[in-house]
């Protein structure tokens, strides 16, 4: 009985999220539906996320497994789960004002966020192909609905449909890869797959390598790596802005953690094979993210291509295949979450009496009418561009230096060149805000968006002063994978 309770303690955060979602669903169904009741359910969902985060932080960093090794709890999972929960909570907090102002409040939204987050945490702790797929689909089924949450909006419905169709395709490819891996290794457990991958003949085992490639394709879709990025700009633009915020932070963090666990854990024995795939994905994602964003006029589409480029930079660290590279990826994802939440909080603050504003040209002269919003948005844009001494510069520095140390200096050089090209469209936004002729004034910044903007800008500005906690935490997390 004590062993059973110990097992439940290891999965307590996931249990809290799922049970909390069920309770809030019943609450929403059986209580009268009103804006006030819907907001109460949103705040209760924030409380559930906070409780789950506390349970994650209370767990030991020592590696422990349950369900016959299918689920692993370790320092890496603890760090990435905390990051995912922070991203989900930030995105959910940003939704309150938006949903109320657009008259689109639905109690199902926070419930779906909780269920999707439970799936993400399952992905992060997956130590078996079956656990991996269960976590992935629990996340996906909730995200399909979340993308199309505004049924009366054609763009939102279109975004949900595109994500569903392409997501189903990627899930099929991932399942095909998993079946090949099972067929050629005789097991779905990562430990058994790792043993098979370390065999002297593994590098020439075509079935295993093809299975790995299909598995990576399925996960690459979730992180929006090129050429599996097709859904990203359309979903970011079409979905409500808080939903796009959620897509940009939490699922990407969880999928990147899953990708690291699969490559550095289960397939460590065939490193040169998947490192080539990671290098190609990194180069393609950085290139497309840098050049495709230049012509964008919609700020959400621009941030979508920015996210694709950022995934490419993070993959450079993974391509290095070293503890330093893994540490770089973890640091990159932490800084990326802060920058992205800050950027989308600024987008949500772009409101006029006529409604939300999403066009870059509409930011003209913002510094003359709302200096605070323009300053925060400028700081976040400079950080995304990788300009020192802001946090975004150090995020890129860690992954580039890891690549150079492993002899992948061409990859680092291409990363620097992509950063230079990408800086153009970030700096253009700053130029529009500070130097163009002022247009109609925006409404006051909502309190919750202002809170996220303030926290994100402080993190981005002050990271250089005290980077030690994040660097040490990321190092400890990354080393548990090796």
Image (cartoon, grey):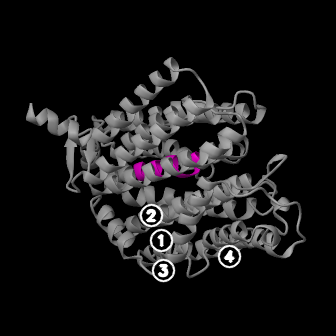
Instruction: Name the residue at 31% across, 61% down.
Output: 477
Q: Are marks 3 and 1 in contact (CB under 8 Å)?
A: no
Which residue: 36% across, 49% down?
53
Mark 3 or 2: the one toward you:
3
Q: Main secondary structure of the magenta part?
A: helix
Viewer-proximal residue among 253 and 199: 253
* Alpha carbons under labels 1 and 4: distance apart: 16 Å
In magenta, the rendered stretch is: 246-259
Lower position in the chain sequence, tag 2 or tag 4:
2
Badges 2 and 1: C-beta atoms under 8 Å apart?
A: yes
Q: Residue at x 61, y 30 (%)?
A: 106
Q: Residue furthest top?
A: 30
Residue beneath disc 1 = 399
Q: Position of residue 463 (x, y in %)?
A: 48, 75
Question: Which residue bears the numbered disc 2?
Answer: 329
The numbered mark at residue 420 is: 4
Q: Mark 1: which secondary structure? A: helix
Q: Crowdedness of circle 3 by 10 Å Cα count: few (<14), some, many (20+)? A: some
Q: Is residue 365 visible?
A: yes
Of the numbered discs in the image, which one, if any, rests on residue 272?
Answer: none
Q: What is the C-alpha distance between the residues marked 3 and 2? A: 18 Å
């Amino acid at each position: 009985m004590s062993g059973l309770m110990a097992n439940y303690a290891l999965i307590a955060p996931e249990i809290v999220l799922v049970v909390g979602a069920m309770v809030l669903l019943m609450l929403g169904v059986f209580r009268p539906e009103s804006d006030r009741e819907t907001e109460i359910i949103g705040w209760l969902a924030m409380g559930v996320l906070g409780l789950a985060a506390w349970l994650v932080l209370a767990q030991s960093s020592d590696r422990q497994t349950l369900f016959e090794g299918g689920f692993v709890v370790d320092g890496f999972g603890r760090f990435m789960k905390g990051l995912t929960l922070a991203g989900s909570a930030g995105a959910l907090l940003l939704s309150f004002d938006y949903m109320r102002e657009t008259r689109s409040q639905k109690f199902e939204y926070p419930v779906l966020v909780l269920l999707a987050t439970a799936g993400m945490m399952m992905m992060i702790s997956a130590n078996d192909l079956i656990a991996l797929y269960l976590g992935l689909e629990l996340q996906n089924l909730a995200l399909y609905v979340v993308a199309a949450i505004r049924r009366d909006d054609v763009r939102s419905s279109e975004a949900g449909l595109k994500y569903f169709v392409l997501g189903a395709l990627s899930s099929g490819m991932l399942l095909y890869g998993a079946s090949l891996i099972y067929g050629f290794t005789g097991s779905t457990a990562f430990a058994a797959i790792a043993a098979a991958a370390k065999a002297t003949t593994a590098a020439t085992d075509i079935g295993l390598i093809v299975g790995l490639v299909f598995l990576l394709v399925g996960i690459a879709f979730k992180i929006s790596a090129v050429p599996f990025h097709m859904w990203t700009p359309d979903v970011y633009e079409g979905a409500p802005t808080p939903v796009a915020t959620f897509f940009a932070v939490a699922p990407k963090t969880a999928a990147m953690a899953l990708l690291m666990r699969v490559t550095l854990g289960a397939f460590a024995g065939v490193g040169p094979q998947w490192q080539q795939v990671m290098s190609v994905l990194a180069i393609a994602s950085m290139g497309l993210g840098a050049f495709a964003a230049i012509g964008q006029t919609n700020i959400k589409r621009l941030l979508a291509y920015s996210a694709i480029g950022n995934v490419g930079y993070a993959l450079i660290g993974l391509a290095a295949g070293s503890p330093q590279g893994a540490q770089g990826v973890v640091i990159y994802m932490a800084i990326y979450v802060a920058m992205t939440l800050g950027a989308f909080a600024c987008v949500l603050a772009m409101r006029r009496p006529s409604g939300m504003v999403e066009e870059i040209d509409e930011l003209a002269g913002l510094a003359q009418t709302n200096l605070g919003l323009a300053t925060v948005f400028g700081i976040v844009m400079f950080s995304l561009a990788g300009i020192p001494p802001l946090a975004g510069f150090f995020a890129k520095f860690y992954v580039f230096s890891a690549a150079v140390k492993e002899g992948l200096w061409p990859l680092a050089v291409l990363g620097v060149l992509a950063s230079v090209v990408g800086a153009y469209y970030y700096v253009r936004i700053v130029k529009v805000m500070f130097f163009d002729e002022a247009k109609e004034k925006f409404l006051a910044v909502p309190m919750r968006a202002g809170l996220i903007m303030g926290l994100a800008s402080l993190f981005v500005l002050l990271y250089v002063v005290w980077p030690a906690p994040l660097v040490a935490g990321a190092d400890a997390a990354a080393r548990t994978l090796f």
